[in-house]
Image (cartoon, helix red, strand yellow):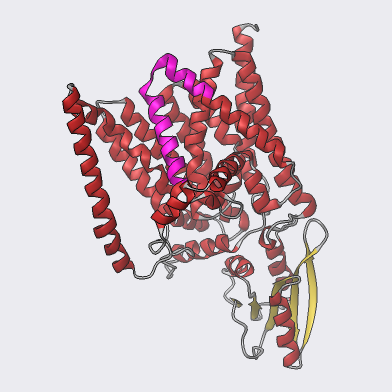
Amino acid sequence: MPAPHVERRVVIAIVITLIGIGVVFRFMHLGTIPGINGDEGWWGVQSTRWMHGLSYEAKTTSGNPIDMAFLVPLGLLHGLAGPSFFVLRLFPAIANVVALGVGFSLARKLYGSPTAWIYTCALAVAPTAIAHSRFCQDPSQSILWTSITMFLALLGLKDRRHWWAYLIAALLAFGMGFWTHPTNVFVAPFLVLPIVPIVRRWIPESRRGRIVFAASALAALLVIVVIVLFVIWPALKSRAGSSVLLDKPWLSAAAERVASPAQWFEHVRNYGRLFTGVTVYRYMSMPDLTVWGYGASALLVMAATGAGVWRLIRLERMSLDVGLVFGWGAAWLLFFLFAGPESIRPHVERWGLVLIPPALLLLARGMVGWLAYRRLATLAVATVLALALLGTFYASYFHEFQTSGGRSHRTFKTASTEPKQQALERILDERKGSEPVLIITQEWWQYWPIRYLAQPDAAITVEMKVPDSVPASGRMYFVDFVGTEELARARAWIAERGLRGRESAIQSAGGRDLVTITEVVR
């Protein structure tokens, strides 16, 4: 056994290393990795329009009310610096670093320093948390708001004197999280925790009284369900009209999932991949992965966490840990029933960010349970796993993008200078003075990022719709991804009008042509 002061120094060094690298990874190559997508450019345009007092879209591209808690800080940031892809992604990265600090503070108040440090380190190195802190889109704040909701609700369970204040605060944080993204509703089970001690006071001591109380509670729950299903839900549908969200057969879909072993298996598998990084790697960079190794590691960590938490509950009999297990389990199950395993597959895993804070807090508690039993071995294994997560993130994310440019969706493919930024810069280099420039980008993925960057110059017009004819003055360009229908349409449009197109290519970091710039030559 090492001396206590030596062990303390080693632990401090480990914590500083893990959190430090995790923070650096949230800002490193922020403006170029991955390539900017259309949703990010859309947010950039809306925020700068708000900043300058112009009209902006009231709903997001998914049809949700626009998140002013995201739009306003993003707009204010653009008041300090002009449009750039680094500035565009800076606020989400900062918000997720704030989530580390807020999470540590609340976890320490809830459980003490050991749990707080473990939770913070786990969140710092979590691949999905890092990757989605580097995106300028509303779900990027999900971890911040859902973690605050979870911690405040658990504090309400712990502090029985001020439970009502914590419940109100948790409800406010929950509202912010739900406004950020509707799938954050799945953190709601934690909200019942502050009122559990109050309800327990109402439970009679006699056996007959308990039976009557349970029957009354079930009857009240049934009445609430009936009101929701046959009064509130139809009223919402009537008010909202046709809606993809409201028109879904939620109950029948949930029943089908319960009866499907394949969906249970997929949910467990996808849940593990959400934490190992496999999901985000397949979504963004698409490296060559040895998936079975990630899966085996995830299963071992899940089993160890469960054993550690069970040990804590048996030894300490803390209602907090029971409440945490309830909140985590209920959120996991409700997500499975009403969102399904397909909602944490690659390309849509942002919907599952709500599942990350409860799982990492549970992991922290499980590790605390093992520390009392096998302290040095637990520290060693946890450190190796955390460093492995960071190492694989660097290799499968940063290194993959820097060497191949990325192999997933074309909007994420990148180079040392982001390709969409390169396209605009090349066009501006060819421009004479302040002559008008019309840029046609027929795809969402190109249109919004280029329009975002071009905003300061009023003489540059960026459009998705192809005009009927060439402008009378100025220059005209098409910007399209290589090998797409949009590029073929641009070439056909030029040929049909007896014009000539002068093409140049922008390459990804892997040396492959990615974007074609076509100048229309009269």
Which residue is rendered at x = 68% and y = 60% of the image? 409
Residue 5's quadrant in the figure?
top right
Quadrant (top left, top right, bottom left, bottom right) of the C terminus: bottom right
Q: Is residue 259 placed above or below 520 in the rendered structure?
A: above
- Looking at the image, residue 237 sits to the left or right of residue 331; the answer is left
Q: In the picture shown, does residue 220 fall above or below 497?
A: above
Image quadrant where residue 334 sits = top left
| Residue 188 screen position, x and y as percent | 37, 43
Q: Is residue 318 rendered to the left or right of residue 261?
A: left
Q: Nearer the viewer, residue 371 or 88?
A: 371
Does 310 appear in magenta?
yes
- Could you say which quadrant of the image residue 83 lies in? bottom right
Residue 351 appears in the rendering:
yes
Where does the magenta region start and end?
307-336
Tell me if 511 is positioned left or right of 222 in this view: right
Q: Is residue 335 magenta?
A: yes
Q: Between residues 352 and 212, which one lies in front from this camera angle?
A: 212
Identified at 69% across, 62% down, the residue is 410
Position of the N terminus, as image quadrant, is top right
Q: Position of residue 60 (x, y in %)?
A: 46, 63
Q: As rendered, which of 52 and 256 lies closer to the eye?
A: 256
Q: How many marks?
A: 0
Residue ID at (30%, 59%)? 233
As drawn, 333 above or below 422: above
Is residue 68 visible to us here? Answer: no
- The kind of secondary structure the magenta stretch mainly shows is helix
Does 216 sit above or below residue 373? below
Looking at this view, name the residue that lies furthest to the right.
511
- Residue 359 screen position, x and y as percent: 50, 35
Residue 394 position within the rendered picture, expressed as x and y whole percent measured from the top left? 71, 41
Of the pair 475 and 153, the residue shown nearer to us: 153
